[in-house]
Structures are given as C-alpha cells and as structure tokens.
Image (cartoon, helix red, strand yellow):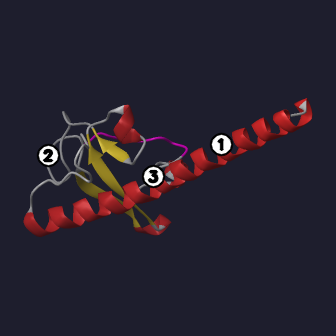
C-alpha cells in the first residue's frame, strides 16, 4: 500500500472515532436526563428516593424552576464532579428546600446554571 493511502485511511479512522465519541457523549447526556426525570417522577409517586440508574451514586431531590426565564432543572443529591456533569447538585450538609436552613446548590455556570446572570430579585 502506498503511504498516501495508509495516511488517508488513518485520518478517516481517526475522524470516525471522534465523530462516534461525540455522538456517544450526546446520547449519554440525553439518556441521563430522561432517566433522571423518570426517577424524579417515581419519587413524587411513592415519596422514596430513586436512583436514575442502578450504579448511580445520586438521586434527584428537587426541581429548580424559574418561570420568568422558562427554565426547569432537576437537582441531584451530592456535589461530586460526576453528579455535576449531569445536573445541578445539592450540598448534602445544607438544608433541603422548605426547611429553615440555608440551601446550597452548585452547578456549572456554562451549562446547568447558564441563566444565573439573568436572575432578578424575586425569581
């Protein structure tokens, strides 16, 4: 085989690898949101925490809705890096919504909290 053919095949293989990897990440992100939603809906039905998938180290504990900005997000228990990749997270040692304690939520400002700069008092 000529060197040009080998290089072309290698570049095509590498390109296919990168396209497949990004498709995998997008699919994983979409599926995780679907599973988190299903776990939250089950929690609302039977008032017990449900993991979105069997090996998850988290579960949805609330939804954060800001009607003026037309945004709604699920809040996951625990602030690990893995959980932050999927949604807004709740610091376990802080209060839960509805309690008389400070509630601490965390999230990436360029994804799940990308609307923070648009918040107003009262939102």
Asked if the stretch drawn in magenta spans residue 106, the answer is yes
What is the magenta range? 103-110
Number of the front mark, 3 or 2: 3
For the residue labelled by badge 1, is the local secondary structure a helix, a strand or a loop?
helix
Residue 43 location, quadrant: bottom left
Residue 43 vs 61, above or below: the answer is below
Compared across the picture, whether 33 is left or right of 55 comes to: right
Q: Quadrant of the C terminus?
A: bottom left
Q: Position of residue 25 (x, y in %)?
A: 52, 48
Q: Quadrant of the N terminus?
A: top right
For the residue labelled by badge 2, is the local secondary structure a helix, a strand or a loop?
loop
Q: Residue at x 31, y 35 (%)?
A: 79
Q: Which residue is mark 3?
A: 28
Q: Which residue is mark 1?
A: 18
Tally the marks.
3
Compared across the picture, whether 83 is left or right of 91 comes to: right
- Judging depth in this view, the residue of 22 and 10 nearest the camera is 10
Q: Which residue is mark 2?
A: 100
In terms of sequence position, does the residue under pointer 3 or pointer 2 come before the other? 3
Number of the front mark, 2 or 1: 1
Q: Position of residue 116 (x, y in %)?
A: 49, 49
Compared across the picture, whether 29 is left or right of 19 comes to: left
Are circles 3 and 2 on residues that touch, CB within 8 Å? no
Tell me if residue 11 can be seen. Answer: yes
């Amino acid at each position: 085989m000529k060197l040009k053919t080998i290089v072309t095949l290698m570049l095509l293989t590498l390109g296919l690898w990168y396209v497949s990897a990004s498709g995998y990440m997008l699919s994983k992100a979409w599926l995780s949101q679907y599973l988190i939603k299903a776990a939250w809906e089950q929690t609302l039905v039977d008032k017990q925490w449900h993991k979105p998938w069997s090996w998850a180290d988290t579960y949805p504990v609330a939804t954060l809705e800001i009607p003026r900005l037309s945004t709604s997000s699920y809040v996951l228990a625990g602030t690990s890096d893995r959980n932050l990749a999927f949604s807004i997270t709740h610091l376990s040692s802080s209060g839960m919504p509805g309690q008389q304690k400070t509630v601490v939520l965390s999230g990436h400002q360029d994804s799940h909290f990308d609307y923070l700069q648009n918040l107003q008092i009262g939102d």
